[in-house]
Image (spheres, rainbow, N blue to C red):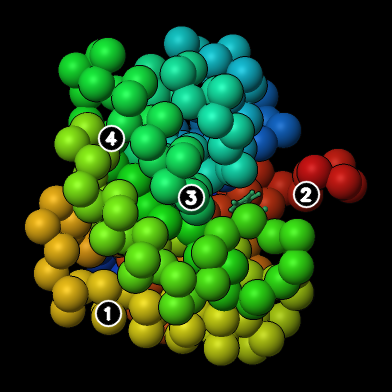
Amino acid sequence: MVEIADSARHILDEVPQGVIVVAAAKTRTPEEVRAAVEAGIVHVGHNYVQETQAMINQVRGVTWHMIGHMQRNKARAAVELFDMIETVDSLRLAQEIDKRCAFLGKTMPVLIEVNSGREPNKDGVWPEQADDLARQIAGLTCIRLQGLMTMGPFSEDAKDLRPCFRATRKAFERLARLGLPGAEMCYLSMGMSSSYRAAIDEGANIVRIGTRLFGPRMSGQ
Ligand SMILES: *Cc1c(COP(=O)(O)O)cnc(C)c1O
């Protein structure tokens, strides 16, 4: 727990002002996440709705980000739990979130997930498809489109990811210029433990960090 607190302080010191550090909490215990929060982390991301449900009452006072692939049948639970959904990649999912938010009288900030590496079987829209989806989403009443998110291909070498980050940033800037009513392009979520410095260089103002904060995960997750 001491190591987690030290890492959290180190990362928070290191990132430039205005960059939001989201602690990626998958596979971690509430105690581990609390250690990061006590050291200053105020944004927590999770990939799974059920695990978040189990953790949320034990980690207070933070902003919750959905960062995993979201099934539509989880939208109802997700809109109750999360303060931002970073992984919207279809109109149907956006419509479901919108409908569930309408029931709750809530407005949900969302990001569009971009498959910046154009990988088959990976979630997210291609960078040039973001405009069309943004136009459709921006019209929904209970959703506020606030930016883009990308993962990029798996690589230990951040250099490999720079072209993907750049493509996502270009799409982000293009969308900002469109000035769609109902959208305000303010967040670009890119970069993880091995790539957040490169991502910040390329314009990210949200980075999602797991391993460097909490230590290695068991393989396969
Ligand atoms: C796990 C995860 C992260 C953090 O990955 P690390 O390499 O452990 O920092 C970031 N974003 C998403 C979407 C994740 O699933």
Give the secondary structure at mark 4. Answer: strand
In front of the other: label 2 or label 1?
1
Q: Which residue is mark 3?
A: 90
- Disc 4 residue: CB within 8 Å of ligand 1: no
- Image quarter hosting the N terminus: top right
Give the secondary structure at mark 3. Answer: loop
Crowding at dot 1, Cα within 10 Å, few <14 / some 14-19 / many 20+, comes out as some
* First of labels 2, 1 by sequence position: 1
Q: Is residue 195 visible?
A: no
Task: Report the side of 81 relative to 54 (left or right).
Answer: left
Q: Which residue is mark 1?
A: 173
* First of labels 4, 3 by sequence position: 3
Task: Report the side of 169 relative to 48 (left or right).
Answer: left
* Pointers 4 and 3 in contact (C-beta within 8 Å): no
Cα separation, mark 2 vs mark 3, equals 32 Å
> Observer-nearest residue: 71 or 58?
71
- Indicate which disc residue 108 carries: 4
Give me the residue at 19% from left, 17% from top: 105
Name which residue type carries label 1.
Glu
* First of labels 4, 2 by sequence position: 4
Q: Which residue is mark 2?
A: 216
Cα separation, mark 4 vs mark 1, equals 22 Å
Give me the residue at 56% from left, 81% from top: 164
Crowding at dot 3, Cα within 10 Å, few <14 / some 14-19 / many 20+, comes out as some
Residue extending farthest to the right is 219
Residue 122 lies, in percent from the top left, at: 70, 60
